Image: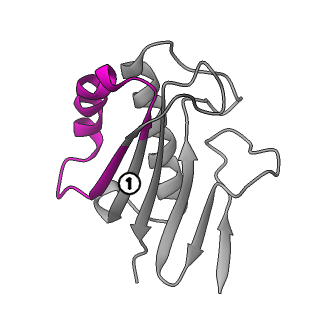
Amino acid sequence: MVERVQVDATSDTGGLYSQAVKSNGLLFISGQVALDKNGNLVGRDIATQTDQVMRNIKATLEAASCTFDDVIKIAIFLVNLDDRPKFHEVRKRYFTGEQPASTLLVVKSLANKDYLVEVEAVAELQR
């Protein structure tokens, strides 16, 4: 059984994709970028954008009754490898316990030229 998760605290997807999907005891969170609830880009620097991305992930986790401690895998997409240290500084404020499995990719571009980072996540649902 698949259940779509609607998250009121993050930007509307315009029906193009689900913000998150529950399936087989897991929560799959679509890639999050630095958009606020109204669809406005938050920040022009990696630290500010990463903080917004993590707030979006947190809101999505909470909508599914999960926390960062339930996250088992993340994939990080950066457009600049030099942003890695600042990204990790912010990440540490949100992932404070056991760390999830993680993949970091440096990409030429994201869906918008002003996006510096995108993060997707998989969490284990509480039973």
Residue at the front extreme? 108
Q: Quadrant of the N terminus?
A: bottom right
Q: Is residue 49 left or right of residue 21?
A: left
Task: Residue 94 in the image: state x and y as whole percent.
Answer: 29, 42
Q: Residue at x 41, y 29 (%)?
A: 50
Q: Residue at x 57, y 73 (%)?
A: 22
Q: Quadrant of the C terminus?
A: bottom left
The quadrant in which residue 18 appears is bottom right
- 119 versus 124 height, above or below: above
Residue at the top extreme? 44
Q: Is residue 123 left or right of residue 32?
A: left
Task: Residue 105 in the image: state x and y as whole percent.
Answer: 39, 41
Q: Residue at x 66, y 80 (%)?
A: 2
List the residue tagged with mark 1: 74
Q: Is residue 83 magenta?
A: yes
Q: Residue at x 50, y 12 (%)?
A: 44
Protein image colouring: one colour
Foreground residue among 63 and 68: 68
The quadrant in which residue 21 appears is bottom right
Foreground residue among 106 and 54: 106
Residues in magenta, as a range: 77-104
Foreground residue among 36 and 24: 24
Q: Is residue 84 magenta?
A: yes
Task: Residue 76 in the image: state x and y as whole percent.
Answer: 40, 43
Looking at the rendered structure, the kind of residue marked 1 is: Ile
Mark 1 secondary-structure assignment: strand
- 114 versus 123 height, above or below: above
Residue at the right extreme? 15
